[in-house]
Amino acid sequence: MIEPWNIKPKDLRQADTRPTFIIFCEDKETEPEYFNAFSSDNISISTIRNCGQHHKQIDFATEYCRKNDLLEIIDEKEKLKIDDGAQVWCVFDRDREPDDGKDSSFSNSIDNAILKGFKIAWSNDNFELWILLHFEKVDPSDASYNHRRKYYERLTQILKTLLPLNQDEERITRNPVFHYDDFMKKRKRFLPITFQHMKGKQEIAIANSKILEIYHSAIPKPHHEKSPCTLVHHLVEELIRAGGRKI
């Protein structure tokens, strides 16, 4: 794996060798660990952790690419200057809070990133929607799924009912106070428990995710109104197409 701080333009011009993915992640736990799992001998993946959300992440990615000479000016606008064998992705959530005034920040960040040549795998409301879609469909017209609280509730119930893989998982998920948000968002719990139950369900998650995307594409609307919805499946499909490991 190429370390993020050592990436140079020559590392990204690998159309004739291994496809390269630079993935800026909002958090430092679940997202980077999930995408690193796609690593194989056929693909190079660099996940950059804890990059913030919305415009903060786009600003971080932009400054990072400037410092590493990955941007050029075309028609007075900054654009990525990488070949077809490389992709730069930004992964962030809406993370809605009551009256937080961040709708425009979320939508504008997506549009600005696309203009620069970044690819976006956003989730509205958060990444746990993508995890949930491995286990069940989500009704796009159900307003309760507009907030991550619902995803945590469903994932809590699902993990409580699944057959535990080992005694450690049984001890955690059968605890009367077990709740996904409190217990499962750290690497030490995500990888050995949640991630293991996600294996073999990738095609289900992609299909369920596409249902949400199609629903919200029927009528033009700003990105922040597309909820529940996630575009993580676009990144996953690209990773697999490029030679990444299937999960």
Image (tube, rainbow, N blue to C red):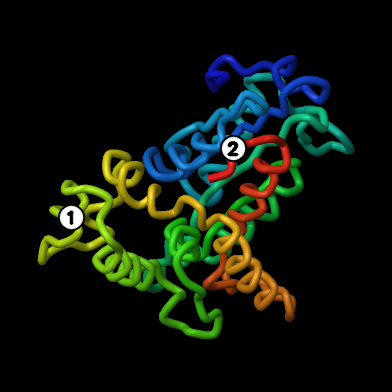
Q: Disc number at residue 215?
A: none
| Labels 1 and 2: the sequence-earlier one | 1
Q: Is residue 30 above or below residue 228?
A: above
Q: Is residue 171 left or right of residue 118?
A: left
- Pick out the residue farthest to the left: 176
Picture quarter containing residue 29? top left
- The percent coordinates of residue 113 (x first, y second) are 68, 47
**93 and 187: which one is in front?**
187
Picture quarter containing residue 73? top right
Mark 2 and mark 1 in contact (Cβ < 8 Å)? Answer: no
What residue type is disc 2 on?
Arg
- The percent coordinates of residue 114 (x first, y second) are 73, 49
Q: Is residue 242 above or below residue 97?
A: above
> Dot 1 surroundings within 10 Å: few (below 14), some, or many (20 or more)?
some
Q: Locate the N terminus and report the quarter of the image it occupies.
A: top right
| Residue depicted at 74% across the width and 41% down the height | 116
Q: Disc number at residue 170?
A: 1
The image shows a total of numbered marks equal to 2
What residue type is disc 1 on?
Glu
**235 and 110: which one is in front?**
235
> Dot 2 surroundings within 10 Å: few (below 14), some, or many (20 or more)?
some
- The percent coordinates of residue 6 (x first, y second) are 57, 14
Picture quarter containing residue 145? bottom left
Residue underneath mark 2: 245
**65 and 199: which one is in front?**
199
Q: Is residue 143 left or right of residue 155?
A: right
Q: CA distance from mark 1 to mark 2?
A: 28 Å
| Residue depicted at 27% across the width and 39% down the height | 188
